Image (cartoon, rainbow, N blue to C red):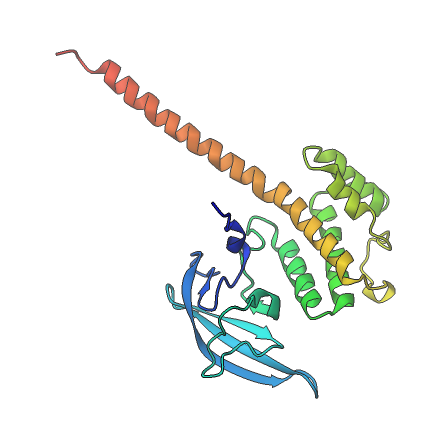
């Protein structure tokens, strides 16, 4: 049996099915309620699509430099990977970054990935560095410099694959506590992809998986309590 779970992490699944960020329904029908375009630069056009969820009727906005519509109308063409063509969406898809991850980190990673999609590598680099810096603050990482703080997180969360922290430790020009993206050389897209995906994996391990584990444990405890209560009632019931 094929595994299609990767579709749950996409915004658009097909030309008329998506994961709605409002009602949080997966694989729900949507319709293109409006379309417009404008000059991003003197030579580049940007397309705007307003998408309406057929379940909750709420609308989201999506920007792309590609014309994704079919020839007859402004509905999406069949067969495209729309997530690869759309560089900015409002709201951003909650399926990509779990809401349990602190918002400051979600916003920075989303902005970094948006910049990366349109090849704004300096902006993507700055947002990625800033996200890592904010993580060290949130986690109260100790140390006199960046390397020491990453090592602190690596030791603090020993249950997480240490190779993930080693990737972050190899980021250069991150020794200052302040963000001056003008002084940083931009990373290329392969490095940015490596750092953002590594950071997202670490955040999943820090903020999402423990909560899911706690939730499953609580569910088992509730079921166990129900079984015990039923058993106690049965034992206390007078015999006929």
Q: How many marks?
A: 0
Image spot of residue 45 (x, y percent)? 63, 83
| Residue nearer the viewer, 151 or 38 | 38
226, above or below 146, in the image = above
Q: Is residue 50 left or right of residue 202?
A: left
Please identify the residue farthest to the left as the structure is shown: 240
| Residue drawn at the location 54% of the way across and 60% of the way down | 93
Please identify the residue farthest to the front as the structure is shown: 1
41, above or below 135, in the image = below
| Residue drawn at the location 51% of the way across and 64% of the way down | 12
Image spot of residue 79 (x, y percent)? 51, 68
* Residue 87 shows up from this direction: no
Image spot of residue 83 (x, y percent)? 58, 65
Residue 228, image quadrant:
top left
Q: Quadrant of the C terminus?
A: top left
Image spot of residue 90 (x, y percent)? 55, 68
110, above or below 40, in the image = above
Please identify the residue farthest to the bottom as the structure is shown: 42
* Residue 219 shows up from this direction: yes
Residue 106, image quadrant:
bottom right
Q: Is residue 23 left or right of residue 239?
A: right
């Amino acid at each position: 049996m094929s595994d299609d779970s990767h579709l749950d992490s996409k915004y658009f699944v097909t030309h008329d099915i998506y994961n709605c960020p409002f009602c949080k329904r997966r694989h729900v029908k949507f319709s293109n309620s409006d379309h417009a375009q404008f000059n991003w630069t003197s030579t580049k056009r940007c397309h705007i699509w307003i998408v309406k969820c057929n379940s909750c009727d709420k609308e989201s906005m999506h920007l792309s430099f590609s014309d994704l519509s079919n020839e007859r109308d402004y509905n999406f063409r069949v067969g495209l990977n729309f997530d690869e063509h759309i560089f900015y969406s409002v709201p951003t898809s909650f399926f990509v970054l779990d809401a349990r991850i602190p918002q400051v980190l979600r916003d920075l990673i989303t902005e970094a990935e948006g910049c990366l999609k349109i090849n704004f590598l300096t902006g993507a680099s700055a947002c990625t560095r800033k996200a890592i810096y904010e993580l060290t603050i949130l986690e109260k990482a100790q140390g006199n410099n960046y390397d020491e703080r990453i090592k602190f997180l690596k030791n603090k969360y020993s249950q997480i694959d240490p190779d993930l922290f080693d990737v972050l430790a190899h980021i250069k020009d991150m020794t200052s506590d302040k963000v001056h993206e003008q002084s940083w050389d931009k990373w290329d897209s392969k490095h940015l992809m490596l750092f953002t995906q590594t950071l997202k994996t670490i955040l999943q391990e820090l903020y999402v998986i423990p909560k899911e584990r706690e939730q499953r444990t609580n569910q088992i405890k509730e079921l166990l309590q129900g079984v015990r209560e039923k058993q106690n009632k049965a034992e206390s019931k007078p015999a006929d």
